Image: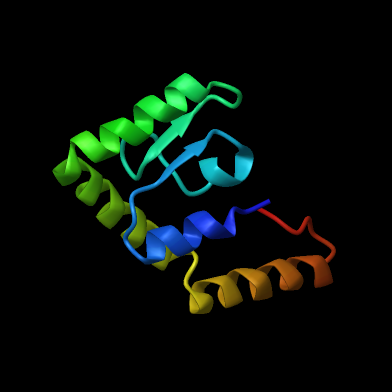
Amino acid sequence: GLVRVLLEAAAAKVPLVSTANEGAADIIAHGITGYLTPIGDPDKLAESILAMLQHPVRAKQMAERAHEYVMSHFAPDKLTERWLAMWRRVAQGLTPCE
């Protein structure tokens, strides 16, 4: 599922670091809007967190890009549009997602 805490962090312009689970990959583009690390690799996770702390300008840029992405794709009005489109597809006998 979708990782709500990452949506909230991005909306608040907080830099994003997560393991590369499916929900996180929907929000984070590695190196662009944050860092994704392999699941089960605490060293890579620590490296990514340290990179954010050691490079605050880059971290701020990633946080800004993540904020823009989340607000353009997951803001309440955007989600409402996507839910309605999904239900219209179901009502037409189509698959829910394109």
The residue nearer to you, when weighing 72 against 88, is: 72
Specify whether 75 is left or right of 60: right
Specify whether 98 is left or right of 29: right
Specify whether 13 is left or right of 23: left
Above or below, 85 against 21 in this view is: below
Question: Which residue appears at 36% of the width and 42% of the height?
Answer: 34
Location of residue 37 in the rendering, given as x and y in whole percent from the top left corner: 48, 28
Location of residue 64 in the rendering, given as x and y in whole percent from the top left corner: 26, 56
Question: Which residue appears at 59% of the width and 27% of the height?
Answer: 39
For this orientation, the residue located farthest to the left is 57
Location of residue 72 in the rendering, given as x and y in whole percent from the top left corner: 40, 65
Above or below, 45 against 5 in this view is: above
Above or below, 8 against 52 in this view is: below
The residue nearer to you, when weighing 82 against 42, is: 42
Question: Which residue appears at 85% of the width and 63% of the height?
Answer: 93
Total numbered badges shown on the rendered structure:
0
Above or below, 33 against 8 in this view is: above
Q: For residue 12, what is the image quadrant?
A: bottom left
Question: Which residue appears at 18% of the width and 44% of the height?
Answer: 56
Q: How is the image coloured?
A: rainbow
The residue nearer to you, when weighing 52 against 27, is: 52
Location of residue 83 in the rendering, given as x and y in whole percent from the top left corner: 66, 71
